[in-house]
Image (spheres, helix red, strand yellow):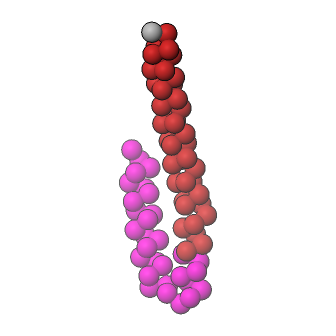
Amino acid sequence: MMTLIFSILMIWIFGKLIGFAFRAAWGVTKILFTFLFLPVVLIALVIGGLIYIALPLLLIIGVVGMIFASK
């Protein structure tokens, strides 16, 4: 009986820790994509001569960012 209770509690606690780890990893991924990946892609588009794609993309991302930042 003690083994069963121990197993249930262990799964419950480690399940919460795994959920926390996924949320933390998602937060780090969002930060990396926002501050590292997106500017590099936009700069590469401008250097490659695709300003007509980079500028609307930058405007769309800016508007969406302003909408979600105000909430």
Q: Quadrant of the N terminus?
A: top left
Query: What stretch of residues is rendered in magenta?
Result: 42-71
Q: Quadrant of the C terminus?
A: top left
Which sits in the foreground, 48 or 28?
A: 28
Residue 57 within the segment the image draws in magenta: yes
Q: Position of residue 48 (x, y in %)?
A: 56, 88
Dominant SS type (magenta) = helix
Whether residue 38 is visible to the viewer of this picture, yes or no, is yes
- Residue in the picture at 46% in, 78% down: 55
Q: Position of residue 40 (x, y in %)?
A: 60, 72
- Residue in the picture at 48% in, 36% down: 19
- Residue in the picture at 45% in, 63% down: 62
Residue 45 within the segment the image draws in magenta: yes
- 63 to the left or right of 43: left
Q: Is residue 16 above or below residue 41?
A: above
Which sits in the foreground, 49 or 23?
A: 23
- Residue in the picture at 54% in, 75% down: 42
